[in-house]
Amino acid sequence: MRVGCPRELLLLLLLLLVVGMTASLAGSQPQQQRKWPVPYRRFEYRPKTDPYCQARYTFCPTGCPIPVMKNEDVIEVYRLQAPVWEFKYGDLLGHLNIMHDAVGFKSSLTGKNYTMEWYELFQLGNCTFPHLRPDMDAPFWCNQGAACFYEGIDDVHWKENGTLVLVTTISGTMFNQMAKWVQYDNETGIYYETWTVRASPDKHAVVWFESYECSKFILRTYQKLADLGAVFNKIQTNYTSITLFTGEPIYLGNETSIFGPLGNKTVAAAIRDFYYPFKPHQSVEEFFLNVLKIVDQVVLNHQFYLFYNLDYWLLPIKSPYIKITYEEIPLPNEDNTWVGL
């Protein structure tokens, strides 16, 4: 995952620290039986981005089309992982296990190498929290994510504080088949989802929602290569997840049913009030006052509003509320197949 402006990052880290220090329980509300986790929604095409959405750092500035490899080519595949914002803060976020994932390729015929990753078009802050525009009733989201493919592998970036390791070797034919899948995956899986949402930290607990971010794209890519016949080396692979803990989520509706002319004004106001403390471009005084408001809402009132698949959900949040985990998800092989989004 890549993060937005430093203040958005600091706000998220303070939320993790303060909320994580508090222990309390909240109950869930009964509702109709649903399938969990809620399936991630795919779309028929990727819509154009709104000019209102602006990125601090340009998305995929050196991107290029995925090349067509010769069928007889032998291509090495590398696991790439480094701390988020490593280019600016070095290993700082690595100490918190906040990592970004990518995959690298090296052609034996041409000697060229490439990097492929999936991340936010407008940084993590915009994907996690919306803008509250005075001219619009509904929160405004800049939450698209997309794949980025470019020539070269920055060895120093990945090696110095992270990982650059060979995981498998594939043929040119397999690479070209993977490239077609990447185009489909990128055009149909549009929106970045920051949060994993679970019933408890227990590994067998119900997962209410799966995140959809950089590591999930890499896991899907590995699985696609395995489906095409790639055999992976036996190495340990861990990934970052930011997890919320909650009772059974309560479905509230979509933008039209909540914020439209016939919408629920009480729910609409509650959602806007919840997101207000997360607004960008705050003064220092506003920033710390809003941290207190967030703690009051999440810890004391046990409420968190989640936007997922263009729908809003109320999460009856409970201890330990929120946690960053860095857990092993094995590479795919004959005995262990990862099932992705």
Image (cartoon, helix red, strand yellow):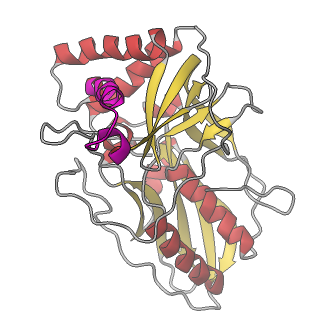
User: Picture coordinates of residue 121 (x, y %)?
Assistant: 32, 55
Question: In the rendered view, does 334 fall on the left or right side of 288?
Answer: right
Q: Which residue lies furthest to the right in this view?
A: 335
The quadrant in which residue 259 appears is: top left
Q: In this view, does 89 lie above or below 25?
A: below
Q: In this view, does 191 lie above or below 180?
A: above
Residue shown at 32%/39% (left/top)?
A: 263
Count every numbered label the image shows and give the total: 0
Q: In this view, does 223 lie above or below 230?
A: above
Front-most of residues 147 and 199: 199
Front-most of residues 215 and 252: 252
Report the quarter where the C terminus lies. bottom right
> Is residue 272 part of the magenta span, yes or no?
yes
Question: In the rendered view, does 194 fall on the left or right side of 177?
Answer: left
Q: Which residue lies furthest to the front in this view?
A: 262
Part of the protein shown in magenta: 256-276
> Is residue 139 part of the magenta span, yes or no?
no
Residue shown at 71%/56% (left/top)?
A: 339
User: Picture coordinates of residue 99 (x, y %)?
Assistant: 50, 41
User: Picture coordinates of residue 331 (x, y %)?
Assistant: 72, 55
The quadrant in which residue 187 appears is: bottom left
**Magenta stretch secondary structure, dominant:** helix
Residue shown at 36%/29% (left/top)?
A: 267
The quadrant in which residue 154 appears is: bottom left
Q: Which residue lies furthest to the left in this view?
A: 135
User: Picture coordinates of residue 222 (x, y %)?
Assistant: 65, 63
Front-most of residues 73 and 181: 181
Question: In the rendered view, does 17 fall on the left or right side of 29?
Answer: left
Front-most of residues 2 and 79: 2
